[in-house]
Every structure is written in C-alpha cells, then in structure tokens.
Amino acid sequence: MNLSTSVAFAVNGERRELVVDNRTTLLDALREHLHLTGTKKGCDHGQCGACTVMVDGRRVNSCLTLAVMHEGDEIITIEGLGAPGSLHPMQAAFVKHDGFQCGYCTPGQICSSVAVLEEIKANIPSHVTADLTAPASVTATEIRERMSGNICRCGAYSNIVDAITEVAGTKA
C-alpha cells in the first residue's frame, strides 16, 4: 500500500514538487520539506491562525489542509510577501505600529491581514457587515471580525488594527 503521493504547486512564485505522505499537512510540507519556517505551528488544530498562508489568494490555516489537496495551487507564505530591505507594505506597517511583541503569531497575522484587505476590496461581507448592499469598508469592527481567527497571546490587537488601517489608507 503506497502512502506517498507526488504533489506540485507554486510556492512564493516558484514551482515545487514534493513526494509526501498522504497525511502530511500543508504546514508540515512548507516547514519540514521546503524549509519555509516563517509559517508557524501554533495549536495544530486551526484555532490560533499562526499557520495562515494564502492559497490562490484566499487565507488558509495550513495545519488543517493536506498538502496533496493543493496540486497546481499558488501558495504565498510570509517569505513570499517581502524580504529584508524590500518589505511588503503590511510588513512595514506591522513594524511601524509595533503590531507584534513576541512575534510568533506575526507571519500568520500578516498573511491574514493582506487577505483581509483583498476580501474587503472584493466586497466580500463578514458577519459584522452592516449593509450588504453597500461596498464593504475598512472599519475597526470589520478588521477585528475578519482577523478573529488569528490569536495574539501578547495582545497587540490595537496595533495590528492600526497597521491594517494604514495599509488600507483609511481611518478605522
């Protein structure tokens, strides 16, 4: 019985092909097979958001999905957003607004933040969207709701909201 499968996907713009045990999560494929350790293993149960990456533009808890499910997908990790000296605007805003303390949740927070702004831009409503007939807007309430799947044990939430608001170019 063969428990391994070949899977190919693009990670941070680079095509990667792996042979993994069918039970390997996307998180473990990224960390253990591709050595992209920016994506963190927090709870390993989809409750903290530390492992958030973007798959085909949507945020995903990489601990809850199997690598073999992502054949042909485009995966963006924190390493794919920016680099020292060339930070993504969200990364720069997190630094400016001190949107982290210990930093463990920060990669997931940043990946989720980038996706949140894309969701708002695409007019995808959240549970707190007041008017479904009006364009979605960047408000503190919207940001907090949309980011609620990303836990920060240090409590840097207000600074995270400030960073997201700055990148959005509005006052929340």
Image (cartoon, rainbow, N blue to C red):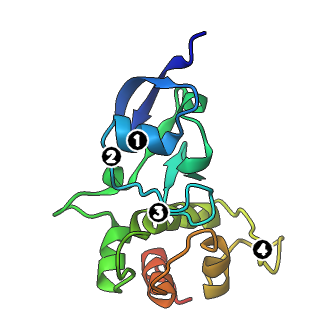
Kind of residue indicated by mark 2: Leu
Q: Which residue is mark 1?
A: 30
What amino acid is found at the position of numbered circle 1 in the picture?
Leu
Q: Earlier in the sequence, mark 1 or mark 2?
A: 1
**Up/down of 157 relative to 68, above or below:** below
Q: Which residue has dot 2 on it?
A: 36
Q: State whether residue 49 is above or below residue 94.
A: above
Q: Residue at left 72%, top 71%?
A: 135
Alpha carbon distance from label 3 to label 4:
29 Å
- Regarding mark 3 in the picture, which secondary structure is present there? helix
Answer yes or no: do the residues labelled 2 and 3 have beta carbons within 8 Å?
Answer: no
> Dot 4, crowdedness within 10 Å: few (<14), some or many (≥20)?
few
| Mark 1 vs 4, N-terminal side | 1
Which image quadrant for residue 15? top left
Q: Amino acid at mark 3?
A: Gly
Which residue is disc 3 drawn over? Answer: 108
- The residue located at (56%, 55%) in the rendering is 44
Q: Which residue is mark 4?
A: 134
Circle 1 — which element?
helix
Give how far across and how far down residue 63 sits, in percent.
56, 49
Q: Residue at x 63, y 67 (%)?
A: 120
